[in-house]
Image (cartoon, rainbow, N blue to C red):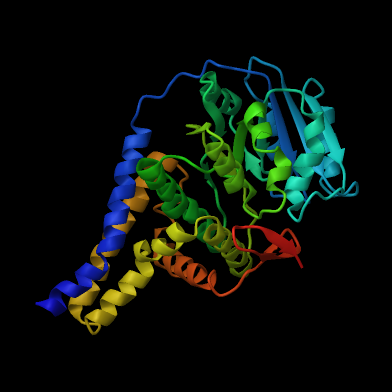
Amino acid sequence: MMNTVLPFFCVLPPLIYGVLALFCARSYFGRKHPLPGHAPSVTIIKPVKGMDAGSFDNFASFCRQEYPAPFQIVFACADPADPVIPVIRRLMAEFPAIDMEMVADATLHGPNHKVSNLVNAYPKAKHELLIVCDSDIRVSPGYLREVAAPFADRQVGLVTSLYRSPGVSGAATAVEAMGFTVEMIPNVMVAMKLEGLSFALGASMAVRREALEAIGGFRALADYLADDYQLGNKVYRAGWRLELSDCYVESVMHREDLATVLSRQLRWSRTMRVSRPGGYLGSGITQPFPMACLALAASGFSGTGWLAVLLLYLVRAAVALVFSRRYVKDGIFPRWLWLLPLRDALAFGTWALSFAGNRVRWRGNLFRLLPGGKIVEI
């Protein structure tokens, strides 16, 4: 009896977590969406370094906003010879009606170079609502309307957005993109349901100037690797409410090899480990791959063990399909569904390796992670 039941008991945590994530997503996406009506003036600060896939089109999507109020775009880089600067100058020439500025300033305010760019660009910001958006992000014409609308409530200090990567090319890129669909977004749904939103996602963060200054401005983030998590968490702890926007942003990816993808995944894993150590450690039991291996080992690799693994992956595939087709709408599944077990194996590998070191490489620079999420450049 024990040999029959034990394999199914092993796969129970990821099974329950998958169903819970689906329930939380149904609750969130099935609610009534408030109509966007509040439209304050906005400054978009975009830190840049080097070229991304489709840089011009990414930037241009912010210039094509259907937004009734004035908005400004400030590009911030450190190197006046950065190869992305000609792209920004072309953008300014093609969209002369958009209020755009470029700040090229190498002044460092801490080891986080991206945050240093934000600090250097901040004096140019004209408006009370500030949006920080990564350089590889592309948005729809209604993005500003959707993101600004929750600020009609004076208790809202920050609005962040989910992100997806449709139109991926190549298996390695698909492995990374499906992580948004089967890990990041389900995790956010569960976190919001169980504890509320207390962090931000770096792809898109809109923050009220008053809330930003209450936490010490961008300078308060300069010593941390996870500046997005810290911004959201500090605003939350300062007494403001955080909201998740209904508007997805799109992370546009290069075609990359698996080694590059895994290096970035390891950086993200170590970032999450130091940002939310307790929750990150506990997430190990909800990971499908190690629980599937445990079920097989517990059964002596018998038919019962394989049946438990089959049940786990039938449910996991169904949950992934619902998220991809109904909630995320990224078009990744079912085309790349065959990669799901490999994605789970690599996710567990980076989760385990995240405990084996404290070094991360980010945009060509090497850092050592300190307790609490601070970093020192090596």
Can you say which quadrant of the picture contains the N terminus?
Answer: bottom left
Q: Is residue 61 visible?
A: no
Residue drawn at x 36%, y 41% is 193
Can you say which quadrant of the picture contains the C terminus?
Answer: bottom right
Q: Picture quarter containing residue 117?
A: top right
Residue drawn at x 54%, y 47% is 165
Q: Picture quarter containing residue 195?
A: top left
Tally of marks: 0
The vertical placement of 139 against 64, above or below, is: below
Camera-side residue of 377 and 140 = 377
The vertical placement of 33 against 369, above or below, is: above
Describe residue 364's horizontal placement relative to residue 133 as left or right.
Answer: right
Residue 9 is situated, as x and y percent measured from the top left of the image, at: 21, 68
Residue 176 is situated, as x and y percent measured from the top left of the image, at: 53, 58
Q: Is residue 4 visible?
A: yes
Camera-side residue of 1 and 174 = 1
Camera-side residue of 214 and 251 = 214
Describe residue 26's horizontal placement relative to residue 263 as left or right.
Answer: left
Residue 30 is situated, as x and y percent measured from the top left of the image, at: 33, 32
The vertical placement of 148 against 276, above or below, is: above
Residue 86 is situated, as x and y percent measured from the top left of the image, at: 86, 42
